[in-house]
Amino acid sequence: MQISCATMTSKEVWRPKVLVTNKETPEKGVNILRQKCDVIFPENVPATRDEIMKLVPGVDGIMWVGHYALNGEVLDAGAPTLKAISTMSAGMDYVDVAEFKRRNFPLGYTPTVLNEAVADEAVGLMIAAGRRFHEGLLKIENGKWQGGPQWMLGRDIKGSTVGFIGFGGIGQAIARRLKGFDVGQFIYSGRNPKPEAADLGAKFVPQSALLKESDYVFIAVPLTNATRHLINAATLRQMKPTAVLVNVARGEIIDQDALVAALKDGTIFAAGLDVMTPEPLPVDSELLKLPNAVIVPHLGSATIRTRDDMSVVAAHNVLAGIEGSPMLSPYP
C-alpha cells in the first residue's frame, strides 16, 4: 500500500500524522502506521475524550481505540487535514454513522477478525452459567460444599435447543463450535433468513418462538434503536424457567433491571454476560450479588492474536483512507 508523498524541500518528505487514541494499542498495527506516518498518542492510559480531542486538530488520520463518542465534533476538530478514521472494533454503537455518511467521510472498522475469539468466550459463558460455576465457587468460599446426588445440578447441552438472536458471523461461529456438543437443534431469529444457516442446520423462527423453545439463548446482534432493550421483562417471561441467557453483544440490548429481577425470582435459570450497563460495572451492582449470573468484564475479543489482527486491519484502513484508496474494511 503506497502513500503519495509531496516533497517539502530537497531534503524533507511529507509524512502524514496519525493519532492513535490509546498508547496500549498493539504494536503490530502501530508499526504498520509508523512505516508511513508520524504517530502520536494521548499521554494518559486510558485517555479522556477531552485529551483526545485536543490532539485531533492537524492530524491526517485517526485510529480510534476505545468506545468514546465518535461524531461530527471529531470531524469538525480535524478539518481540514483529517482524511480518514478507523475504529478498532466491530460494534459501532458509539459512532454517529449517519454523520459520517452525510459527509461521505472514510470510516473503517474491524469486523470478522474477532468472531472466533468472541465465540470461544460465548461457549465458555454458556457452560459456566448452565453448570453453575460461579455459584459453586461461592459455595466453596463460604464453606457450604455439601455434595450429594441432587446438589448443584446444572443444565445439559446435549439434546438442547440453542437459539440465536442474530445469526451473523459471531452467531455462526458459536454454532460451529457447538456442533461437537450434540445439540438437539439450532434456531435463530433476525430480520431475514441467512443462507449460511442451512450448512449449520439452523432454522429461522420468529423471536417469540425462539424464546419459548430455547434452552440456551445467545444474543449476537448489534445495538441499534431497534434492539435496545430487546430483552425486557415481557420477553424474559417468554423464556423457559430452565433457560440460560448469554450476551456477547452489547449490554443495552438487555433491560438490566428486568434481568436482575428475572434471575432473582427464577423466571430464567441463569445468565452469562460479557457485556452490561454501564461499563465498568459499579462494584455495588445487583448483578454482582447474584449466584446465577456469570459476569466477565467485556473480554470477548481479548486475546493476543485477535487484538493484533484488529490493530492491523485498523491501521491499513487508516493508511488507505489517507491515500484516498478503498479501505481494507470500510464501514458499509
Image: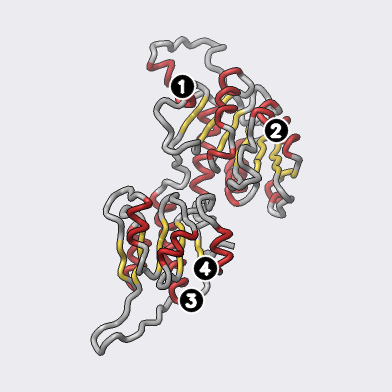
Q: Which of pointers 3 and 4 lies earlier in the amino acid sequence?
A: 4
Query: Quick check: marks 1 and 3 in contact, CB under 8 Å?
Result: no
Observer-side mark, 2 or 4, equals 4
Q: How many marks?
A: 4
Residue with the mark numbered 2: 211
Within 10 angstroms of label 2, few (less than 14), some, or many (20 or more) residues?
Answer: many
Alpha carbon distance from label 1 to label 2: 25 Å
Residue drawn where x is 36% and y is 82% of the image: 5
Query: In the picture shown, does residue 167 fall above or below 19?
Result: above
Within 10 angstroms of label 1, few (less than 14), some, or many (20 or more) residues?
Answer: few
| Residue 256: image location, x then y, percent | 55, 31
Alpha carbon distance from label 2 to label 4: 40 Å
SS at mark 2 in the image: helix
Residue with the mark numbered 3: 324
Q: Which of pointers 2 and 4 lies earlier in the amino acid sequence?
A: 4
Residue with the mark numbered 1: 289
Observer-side mark, 3 or 2, equals 3
Quadrant occupied by the N terminus? bottom left
Alpha carbon distance from label 3 to label 2: 46 Å
Q: Is residue 180 visible?
A: no
Q: Can residue 311 be seen in this view?
A: yes
Horizontally, residue 60 falls left or right of residue 270, namely: left
Q: Residue furthest bottom?
A: 10
The residue type indicated by label 1 comes to: Lys
Q: Which of pointers 3 and 2 lies earlier in the amino acid sequence?
A: 2
Within 10 angstroms of label 4, few (less than 14), some, or many (20 or more) residues?
Answer: some
